[in-house]
Structures are given as structure tokens and as C-alpha cells.
Amino acid sequence: MRRLTLSLTLILTSLPAMAHAQNTKPAKKPSIYEFKLTTIDGKKIDLAKYKGKVIVIVNVASECGYTGQYKALQALHAKYAKDGLAILAFPCNDFGAQEPDSETKIKAFAEKTYGVQFDLFSKVKIDSKDASPLFKFLTSKDTNPKHAGAVKWNFEKFIIGRDGTIVARFLSETEPDADDFLNPLRKELSKK
């Protein structure tokens, strides 16, 4: 009888804690689609417009040794936009001061020199306490444990799957037309 009383007491005292645990929802993780950004032309857009697409996010600079990657990025855009690829380029002057020009000049350079037709955004800071919230998100250990860490240079690339998760990250040295980059990109594009 004593055991039964003890067991009932334990069960009854734990019920409020169990009820609270069932009503507590886990904290919602931020989503890439929650960001609102400004295009290179000054228009405000919501990244939710890219929901369901495969996104490549890249920080760019016009005077960098990797600037030629614009050509391969444009080729990817031309080939895969119809399959749901969106390339989002963010000019940044943080690495070697290689993007000193105005947004008007950056856009003109990218379009005239490389025929860029993918989405260009306003200049961002990446390597400072004033870093863009988007790049903080992309490099955070909380949202991106597998690919976390500071951006090291211009033309680092992030592949975002159709579900909004970061599936791959590539340093500047990896060209957008290299198999190492194309394989995970094509895999994500094949998911409908």
C-alpha cells in the first residue's frame, strides 16, 4: 500500500510539468525567407519571393582576381533559371577594398562586361560588426552548423535548397562551372 501511495504521489506531482512540456513549442529557427533586402536599383524585396527555388548567394567585387566568375554565374543563370535557379549577388568592399564604386557603376560594369542578368543587390558589409543580417545568418553556427564560419574573401558561394536550407558552401577558389560546385547544384535543381 505504501508503494502505491508513493507511486501515485510521484505521478500526480509530475503531471503539471508534463502538461507544461507538451504545451511548450520549440523556438522557431529563422528562415532565409524572412529577410527583406534592397536591390542594386534601390527596390525593397522580400526573399520569400524566391521560395521553392534553388538559390546561389555570392558576395561579389568588380576589382577582384575572381571577378571573372561573373561569366560562369551568368552562364548558370542562362542555363538553369527556367529550372528554378536564382542567383543573388551582393557587392561587398570588405575584402581588399575591391568594390569601391557606386551601385550604379557596379551594375553597369556587371551588365556591360559579363552580360549579367541575375539579381544584383545593394552593397553589403560582411566582415564587420555591421555585417549584413543575411550573411550573419548564412555563416552562423546556429543556422548553419555544417558550413558555419566567417566569409574569407570575395566570391564565396552558398547553395540554398528549395526548402530554404543551406546545402553547400564554396570558397572563392571553387569556380561556378567546376564539378564540385555543379554536382550539388544540379542535385538540388533535380528536386521538384
Image (spheres, grey):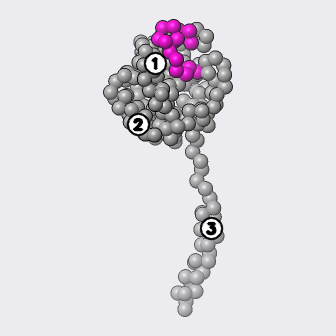
- Give how far across and how far down residue 137 sits, in percent: 55, 35
Q: Relative to 15, say whether 53 is above or below.
A: above
SS state under label 3: helix
Residue 77 % position (x, y): 46, 22
In this rendering, the label closer to the viewer, 3 or 1: 1
Q: Earlier in the sequence, mark 3 or mark 1?
A: 3
Q: Which residue is mark 3?
A: 19
Tell which of 118 and 37 is nearer to you: 118
Picture disc at residue 84: none
Mark 1 surroundings: few (<14), some (14-19) or many (≥20) residues within 10 A: many
Residue 71 lies in quadrant: top left
Closer to the eye: label 2 or 1: 2
Going by the numbered disc 3, the residue's amino acid type is Ala
Q: Which residue is mark 1?
A: 74
Distance between the Cα atoms at labels 3 and 2? 43 Å
Location of mark 2 (residue): 190
* Mark 3 or mark 2, whichever is nearer to me: 2
Residues tagged 2 and 1 counted as in contact (Cβ below 8 A): no
User: Which amino acid type corresponds to the residue marked 1 in the rendered image?
Assistant: Gln
Q: Report the residue that reaches farthest toward the front.
A: 82
| Distance between the alpha carbons at the discs numbered 2 and 1 | 20 Å
Question: Residue 117 in magenta?
Answer: yes
Amino acid at circle 2: Ser
Quick one: SS at disc 1? helix
- Indicate which disc, 2 or 1, sits on the residue closer to the N terminus: 1
The quarter of the displayed image where residue 36 is located? top right
Quadrant that contains the N terminus? bottom right
**Residue found 46% across the figure and 40% down from its top:** 192
The mark that comes first in sequence, 3 or 2, is 3
Disc 3/disc 1 C-alpha distance (Å)? 55 Å
Classify 10 Å Cα crowding around label 2: few (below 14), some (14-19), many (20 and above).
few
